[in-house]
Image (cartoon, rainbow, N blue to C red):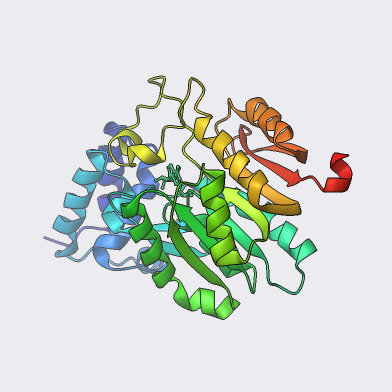
Amino acid sequence: MTDPSIASVLGAAEQRLAAAGVDSPGTDASILLAHAWGLDGRGLSRARLMGDPVPPAVVPVFDALVERRAARVPAQHLTGAAHFRTLTLPVGPGVFVPRPETELLVDPVLAHLARTRPDGGGRVVDLCTGTGALGLAVATEAAGTSAVGVEIDPTAVGWARRSAEAVAADLAGAGSTFIVVEADASDPGAVRKVVDDRLAGTVDVVVSNPPYVVADGTTTAPEVVDHDPPSALWGGGDDGTRLPRGIIAAAAHVLADGGLLVLEHADTQGVLLREASIAAGFARVTTHADYTGRDRFTTAVRQSHLERK
Ligand SMILES: C[S@@+](CC[C@H](N)C(=O)[O-])C[C@H]1O[C@@H](n2cnc3c(N)ncnc32)[C@H](O)[C@@H]1O
């Protein structure tokens, strides 16, 4: 019998995953085949172009991965890696898998640092850091940044530290640092202490993707409900904004005048969090949409004492 072609193996897997309700069955099948084969995405494309058959030893490994994905285990938990902007971060049970829409938050942070710290030296706090995705992306893309990730869950703190180790060369290349502190990011006093201890009391940017999901029973995807840690999901309160409001309060407490807050939230929370930001002393409060056109994050500038008068 001849070894199976890549197209036939992927086609069968795509059908299996689609039948199991997986959102992007074709993409996930390719990711899992590359992983089972020990290739990266480019290597799999090259093998496809060359018409290479799938080696017999790879097939059962791939089939087992496809079955686990069909049981709705996230693809990133199966490969042990999540891609976030230019970085590949280790992930697994106990940490929130960073999402593509969160990558958008990095752009306004970089633009603000380029404008206000053109020679580097930016000080950035990533509240609710999880894997450290946001803080690490900023620190590796903006040279000379001192970034601190704040996370309450000790398991996630461990993952964030592993992430920092995984991208240590990128951090060093950028001349930046990223450290992780276990603390309550919604407690302004606790965040103040972190900033005083680690960033000498001044912060240019607070960036945050906090828990904000509304616990109204509409979030049912098994990948989320069964595999993201509960502490990463539920925002609290009737509208899911209890934690995000705490982040706004903490940011107002530690940002320098003119400092920037970049806060991810649900598409239903734009107005609520704009109002909360203005009430906390922020100006130029703007809600931004994600790739699907839904409200996804808000930027706000800590008002200077002059403006506030
Ligand atoms: C939605 S996940 C986001 C993780 C990461 N920022 C990202 O974008 O992928 C929220 C994270 O906040 C953490 N968290 C929840 N409540 C917290 C709190 N009060 N203080 C600090 N971290 C908290 C959770 O453990 C989780 O890692």
Q: Is residue 147 visible?
A: no
Q: Look at the image and tell me in which quarter the C terminus lies.
A: top right
x and y, in percent, of residue 9 in the image: 25, 52
> Is 19 situated left or right of 46 in this image?
left
The residue under the point 78% across, 63% down is: 116
Name the one closer to the observer, 145 or 56: 145
6 vs 238: above or below: below
Residue occupying image coordinates x 21% and y 51%: 65
Instruction: Please state the horizontal and vertical placement of residue 277, each as a whole percent of the image.
Output: 69, 35
For image coordinates 27% across by 39% down, the residue present is 72
Q: Residue furthest left?
A: 1
Name the one closer to the observer, 94 or 89: 94
Image-based side of 33 in relation to 280, left or right: left
Q: Is residue 104 left or right of residue 212?
A: right
Percent across and percent down for residue 24 are 40, 41
Q: Quadrant of residue 35?
A: bottom left
206 in relation to 222, above or below = below
Which image quarter: residue 165? bottom left
Q: What residue lies at 67% left-to-right and 44% top-to-bottom?
A: 252
Q: Is residue 233 visible?
A: yes
In the rendered view, tell whether residue 250 sits above or below residue 107. Answer: above
Q: Nearer the viewer, residue 9 or 76?
A: 76
Quarter the N terminus occupies:
bottom left
